[in-house]
Image: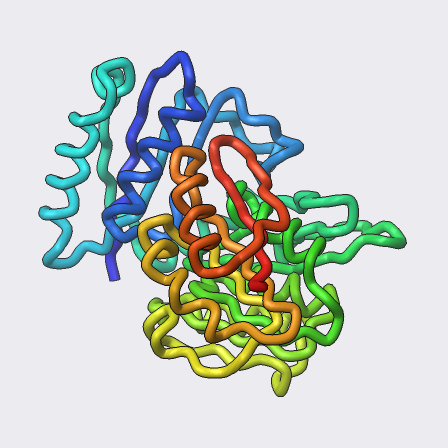
Amino acid sequence: MKWIQTRVIFESSDPESAAAMITDIFCDLGLQGVIVESPDADPELDWADDALPRPRQNAVIGFFRADDQLEQNRRKLEEALCRLPASVADACSTRYSDVDEQDWAESWKAHFHPVRISDRLVVKPSWRDFQAGGDDIVIELDPGMAFGAGTHPTTALCMRLIEAHLRPGARVLDVGTGSGILLVTAAKLGAAQLEGIDCDPVAVDVAQQNLLANRVCKDCFCLRTGDLVTDTRGSFDLVVANILTQTILPMIPDIPVLLTGEKIFITSGIIEEKRDMIIGALQQQGFTILEVLNEDGWVAIAAKLA
C-alpha cells in the first residue's frame, strides 16, 4: 500500500492555534493522527530525538492512502485550508510525496524517546532504553501506524485522568483504542479486565502487540474491530474515549448503559471551543463532571454517572 505524505507548511503569530485548526481539517477527512512540527517545540515535552535536526518551519503532516479517494481528499483539504482565517490561509503551502507503508511505519522510530506524562507515568518507545525510578510506571509502546503515542495532549490528558480516577480491579472499555496506550495504562494502574474496540483493524493488531509487550495477560483483554459503541455489549466501571468531538457527541447517550460500579466516563479529543457543548451533553445524560484538564487548546473530561 502506498501512502501520500501531505505536509501543510504555515506561518502564524499563534502557531499552536493554527496547527490545531489544520489538524482539525485532517481529522475531518478521516485521519486518526498527524505529526505537528515546530521549531519552537520543547524537546522535554515531546518524543523528538535531540540528535535530529529541529524543524525550520511550522508544519502539520498527515498521510492519505493512495486509493480512489485520494484526489477527493486532496481537493477537500485544499478547499478547507482556503477557508481558514486569512492570517493562516495566506501563509499556507502544501507539499505531497509518496511513502511506502513500511517506510512510513519505520520512520516514526527515529523521532521518539521516553516522555514523562505525570509524576508516575512514563511512555517509553519499545526500541529505547530508560532508567526507571522507584515509583515510575513505564508503558512500553510501539505506535506503528495506529493513533495514540502519548505525545498528543489528548492522549496524555486521558492518561492522567485514568491515573486519577481508576480503581484497582476495574473493568475498562477503550472506545477507539488506537495503539492501545490507554488500555496499557489502565492495566498498569490495576484494571482487572480490558476491552478495546476500533474501526481500524490495523489499530487492533497494534494494540494487541502493545498489550502483550507490556506483559498484560492475554486472558485479561479483548480487542475487536467494529462500530465504536453500537457493537459493544457488557458493563464497565470506566469507559474512555479519546476520539473526535463529532464522534463523541452522538455517542454520549449510549454511554450510560455501558457503565456499572464506579460509572466513570473519560473523554478527550475535544477542542476548547467545544468543551461546554460536551459538558452540557454529559449533564443531560445524568453525569456529574469530576475533573476537566486543558492543554494546548485541547480538553479532557472525567465524569461520573449518578
- The answer to which quarter of the image holds residue 273 is top left
Residue 304 spot, x, y in % from top left? 59, 59
Give the side of residue 129 with respect to residue 104, left or right: right
Q: Residue at x 43, y 44 (%)?
A: 270
As drawn, the residue found furthest toward the right would be: 134
Q: Residue at x 44, y 60 (%)?
A: 285
Along the viewing direction, whichever of 40 and 178 lies nearer the viewer: 178
Q: Residue at x 39, y 32 (%)?
A: 20
Give the side of residue 75 with respect to residue 18, left or right: left
Residue 294 spot, x, y in % from top left? 56, 36
How many numbered badges does the structure rendering display?
Answer: 0
Q: Residue at x 58, y 80 (%)?
A: 221
Quadrant in which the C terminus is drawn: bottom right
Above or below: residue 82 compared with residue 126: above
Q: Is residue 209 visible?
A: yes
Residue 150 spot, x, y in % from top left? 57, 49
Q: Is residue 103 visible?
A: no
